[in-house]
Amino acid sequence: MIKMESGSISRKRSFVYTILLFILAGIFEIGGGYLLWLWLREGRGLLFALSGSIILFLYGVVPTFQPSYFHRIYATYGGIFVVMSILWGWIFDKIPPDNYDLIGALIILIGVSIIYYWPREDDNI
């Protein structure tokens, strides 16, 4: 487990590290799920199913590198997942987000930022 003590890693580097892990987990979960979707819904080959399953397994591993408690990691990841799903639809399905998608995503990001990054006495886990 990574300790986030003041002398071990700067707050800025910690923020970048955790954001990159959340994005990587999101890519793995959405990408793996998308490959399974293509296999089941669009009749793609078994390679899509196998690849999607492996990628989803990796999604399960990535959050373990986050320096916080399980509940905060997964609550925050849930919000990141929502935003990344909207972006995925825009990039891969060519469906741009509407104003309500953007407003909802902003509210979610504010909420998960408070959940994960608000300083607490128990931050040094």
Image: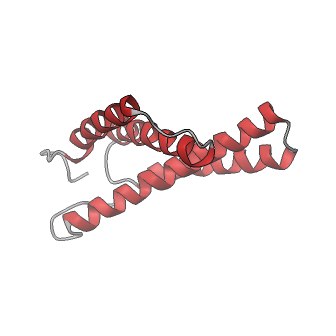
Residue 48 in picture, x, y percent from top left? 79, 47
Q: Nearer the viewer, residue 92 or 118?
A: 92
Q: Is residue 111 above or below residue 25?
A: above
Residue 5 in picture, x, y percent from top left? 19, 62
Q: Quadrant of residue 100?
A: top left
Q: Nearer the viewer, residue 76 or 63?
A: 76
Tag count in the figure? 0
Residue 65 in picture, x, y percent from top left? 43, 56
Residue 56 visible in the picture: no
> Which quarter of the rendered picture does the N terminus lie within?
bottom left
| Residue 4 falls left or right of residue 82 | left
Residue at 22% across, 65% down? 12
Q: Nearer the viewer, residue 25 or 92?
A: 92
| Residue 57 falls left or right of residue 116 | right
Residue 35 visible in the picture: yes
| Residue 93 falls left or right of residue 71 | right
Residue at 85% across, 36% down? 43
Q: Is residue 39 above or below residue 3?
A: above
Q: How is the image coloured?
A: secondary structure
Q: Is residue 114 above or below residue 12?
A: above
| Residue 31 falls left or right of residue 120 | right
Q: Nearer the viewer, residue 40 or 6?
A: 40
Q: Quadrant of residue 34?
A: top right
Residue at 41% across, 59% down? 20
Residue 61 in picture, x, y percent from top left? 54, 51
